[in-house]
Image (spheres, helix red, strand yellow):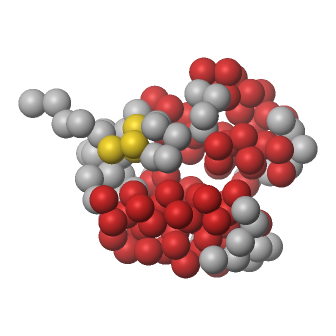
Amino acid sequence: MTRKLLSDAQGLAVSTDSIESLTAYVRGVDLLLNSSADAVAALHDALEADPEFDLARVALACAHAANDDQADAPLGEPSCCGCPRTRRERQHIEVIKLLLGGDNARAAVLGREHLREFPDDVLVAHMLTRGRLG
């Protein structure tokens, strides 16, 4: 039986079964895009509801980076143990990891390729623009 994935605010599939986590994630990304420090709390809520929701973990690391407190939320390795993750999510995570890790040249190339295929991936677009790489 194929599991139907939930979608974010842009209609992109996300690998969580938790409506509560998804709702907090969508709110957190929106707050992050609007440069609100409240993004951290919303993204913590998303991870509390689903600790294996790696997109929320990546967004939280972005929120901490935006607040210049990167040490508070190390990105680490994806925690998703066996849950399906889409190719879009894997690419999204890779681009953000490169950006937060300081590999801007590679992040810019992969990020632009990613956005050609997934133009609605607002967090990747935001982070590339924020880093003046987009």
Height in image: 11 above or below 36?
Answer: above
Q: Residue furthest right?
A: 132
* Whether residue 75 is situated above or below residue 84 in the rendered picture: below
Toward the viewer: 49 or 9? 9
**Residue 122 percent coordinates (x, y):** 65, 43
In percent of the image, x 73 and y 62: which residue is there?
Answer: 34
Residue at figure coordinates x 46%, y 37% from the top left: 11
Does any portion of residue 94 appear in the rendered image? no
Residue 38 sits in quarter: bottom right
Q: Is residue 95 left or right of residue 41?
A: right
Nearer-the-camera pick, 116 or 7: 7
**Residue at 65% across, 47% down:** 123
Closer to us: 58 or 22: 22
Q: Is residue 132 above or below residue 44?
A: above
Q: What quarter of the picture does the C terminus occupy?
A: top right
The picture quadrant where one finds residue 50 is bottom left
Q: Residue at x 45, y 66 (%)?
A: 24
Residue 80: in sight, yes or no? yes
